[in-house]
Amino acid sequence: MSSAAELEIAEESDVLVVAYFDRLEGDAYTAFRTVAETTDSVAFAETTDKAVGKAAGLSKAGVVIIKNFKARSTLPRSGVACCAAAARRVCART
């Protein structure tokens, strides 16, 4: 994901997990990709773009879970180490 406009389109999903990384590499990125590639019930997006991270509600590398059921709720998680666990928890609830 490379722009805030792309984020707005993706946010139309019932549940969107957005990960903001410094680089698209490393253990946390690999874990995130593994969960994203094996989960069909939730939309996933990744970015290294600071503006996209900020638009998603992240001020530093991490993951945010955006739920759009009755009312939107954004659940930011700090640090990328928790991204796979957070994504799995959301996937288990959908």
Image: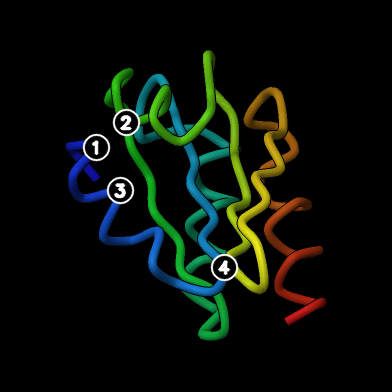
Q: Which residue is mark 1?
A: 4
- Secondary structure type for disc 2: helix
Q: Which residue is mark 3?
A: 7
Q: Position of residue 3 (x, y in %)?
A: 18, 37
Say which residue appears at 74% left-offset and 66% top-offset.
90
Q: Which residue is mark 2?
A: 52
Which sits earlier in the primary sequence, circle 4 or circle 2? 4
CB-based contact (under 8 Å), mark 1 and mark 3: yes
Mark 3 is surrounded, within 10 Å at the Cα level, by few (under 14), some (14 to 19) or many (20 or more) other residues, namely many
Say which residue appears at 33% left-offset and 18% top-offset.
50
Whole-angstrom CA distance, mark 3 to mark 2, is: 7 Å
Say which residue appears at 64% left-offset and 73% top-offset.
69
CB-based contact (under 8 Å), mark 3 and mark 2: yes
Say which residue appears at 40% left-offset and 59% top-offset.
11
Task: Specify whether 92 is left or right of 31.
Answer: right
Mark 1 is surrounded, within 10 Å at the Cα level, by few (under 14), some (14 to 19) or many (20 or more) other residues, namely some
Q: Which residue is mark 4?
A: 15
Q: Position of residue 2 (x, y in %)?
A: 18, 38
Q: Nearer the viewer, residue 9 or 2?
A: 9
